Amino acid sequence: FWARETSADWWDLILMQGEVVHWLACALYVACRKSILPTVGSGLMEGNCVSLTRILRSAKLSLIQFFSKMKKWMDMSDLPQEFRERMERLERNFEVSTVIFRKFEPIFLDVFQNPYEETPKPQRSRKQRRKCSVKELFNFCWTLFVYTKGNFRMIGDDLVNSYHLLLCCLDLIFANALSYPDSRELLNPSFKGLPADFHTAEVKASEEPPCIIATLCELHDGLMVEAKGIKEHYFKPYISKLFDRKILKGDCLLDFCSFADNNKALNKEYEEYVLSMGDFDERVFLGTDAEEEIGTPRKFAADMPVGKTTTRAHVECHLQQQFEKKRSFAPSTPLTGRRYLREKEAVITPVASATQSVSRLQSIVAGLKNAPSEQLIAIFESCVRNPIESIMNRVKEIGEAFCQSYTQSTDDQPGSHIDFAVNRLKLAEILYFKILETIVVQETRRLHGKDMTALLEQDIFHRSLMACCLEIVLFAYSSLRTFPWIIEVLDLRPFYFYKVIEVLIRSEEGLSRDMVKHLNNIEEQILESLAWTSDSALWKALQVSENKVPTCEEVIYPSNFEAGNGGSGLGHLPMMPISPIVHPRVKEVRTDLGGSLRRDMQQLSPISVHERYSSPTAGSAKRRLLAMTAQKTCR
């Protein structure tokens, strides 16, 4: 009875929120995706090939509204987790495509003529093949991109890789436009990548097709090595397959005899893909009603014309906020509550932000190898027991586990290609050995030449550090496989991962602000919930200390407490601890509490790396156990 009452309440609530036909569209899409049709050869196909785009157009429902309403519909209908994950992937793909298309338009205008200023030319004869117009070229290039992206599922929801795939498509279309008889009608004469003889009477045909990947990367925030890697290993082989399957044909894709057939065949193939996969048709960005169908209004609520209903204004304002949220790639921080604050005006695009994160990471590891340096090897050899063999074996083991999981498809997400996994792993290994060397050098200096064997033989220390390096690389590439994915793959407890974060931050000054914020966010996730699960390593640590949880007074220096009513007084209550003194790299991304303290007064954590990963003795167990945790809790 209670279930029936609850269901009835849900229906009443739904009927009050928007038009009924919108909810019908959600129900129809779910039913279509749940159906299974027999195919030739006694096979089965999921879905009944009903177009999501047609459903939404019939219901006059925008994509952003659809995703918002589907969340409520899935809750009300209690749909399985597998379907929810499918919707999350679909929404993520939509977010990436929205960002990419906004980048596509200005790049196209830089390379080619403006498709919106083109005047249609009359056709002289019915039998005469019509020339390729700039507008058709614009649509063809985008369709080629979305169809190719759909073939590589591991690229579809990856912003960096998707952007570089777009550059590959533009590079291909440019090469074909250059060999087109009327190339001057298509290409922008001021584009920097044009050949030197383009403006002469006759353009000499080159034996090798020209490549403008480097130029596009320089002008439009790309990473040349990444883009050329995708072109050589993925894009070119795939285009060859399209020629083998007769989807594309001709020496020049834009030739009078070939373009119409190529355009028709490509659109037909993409339509079949959309129907079979149940995805939204990404050609929606090309339509004249694109803004209405997508749901991204250009005006804020303050700009609404007089007479617009309050409901309509509220919906459009919500959609604008929704799009701004999707456009933001800044990590949130749950404990500090800054996710509730409006971000500063963005000065760079999401694509630029993502590629700059990768560039920053590559600059950190530039010129280094994914192996110990000569200095680090010398440190290993100076230890009582040389740990290099166990360290190298551990790195190899972690690398194999990472590559296997990264390339394996799951219900949550498709697997990535092994080349992507190897590339990410190599960057993480270089970062690991670089930071390990810095940590050991700092600890040796701090402990006045004490032997580092005990620390370097700590398995959990190395696993935590390597996991943290992998997390940094995945975050830089805007991967969906972010925390806690990496600790699940490596079977690492959040408590141990937490212990290495501040060690890493203070050992690597080259990390970008967003990277530090991301690690700070992970710290807060662990403190907020993950450290307190029933299987947490925290409880074992408490048992070692005979279940005596250290107080703030036991783990914070006395100088960090107020002196009392007559003390120096920084505006705090008497005898209440101020924020613990932390490393500047950690402090710069945290709240402003205690921010008036001079940086030259800030100290490093009182707990050394050696102490963090040593077995606690009876006299120091309480201090070592939760020194960092207690500091964070006080904060």
Image (cartoon, rainbow, N blue to C red):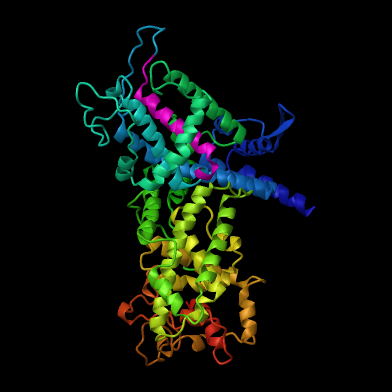
Q: Does residue 198 show up?
A: yes
Residue 198 appears at what percent x and percent y?
23, 27
Q: Quadrant of residue 172?
A: top left
**Residue found 50% across the figure and 33% down from its top:** 147
Q: Which residues are magenta?
A: 130-155
Magenta segment main secondary structure: helix
- Total marks in image: 0
Is residue 144 within the magenta segment?
Answer: yes
Q: Residue furthest left?
A: 200
Residue 496 at what x, y percent from top left? 56, 72
Q: Determine the image quadrant of residue 431.
A: bottom left
Q: Residue 226, percent across and down?
A: 41, 47
**Residue in the image at 59% along x and 63% along y:** 490
Q: Is residue 332 visible?
A: no
In this rendering, the answer to whether 431 lies above or below 423 is below
Q: Is residue 241 magenta?
A: no
Q: Residue at x 66, y 37 (%)?
A: 33
Residue 508, horizontal then vertical, whole percent:
39, 68
**In the figure, 40 relative to 506: above or below?**
above
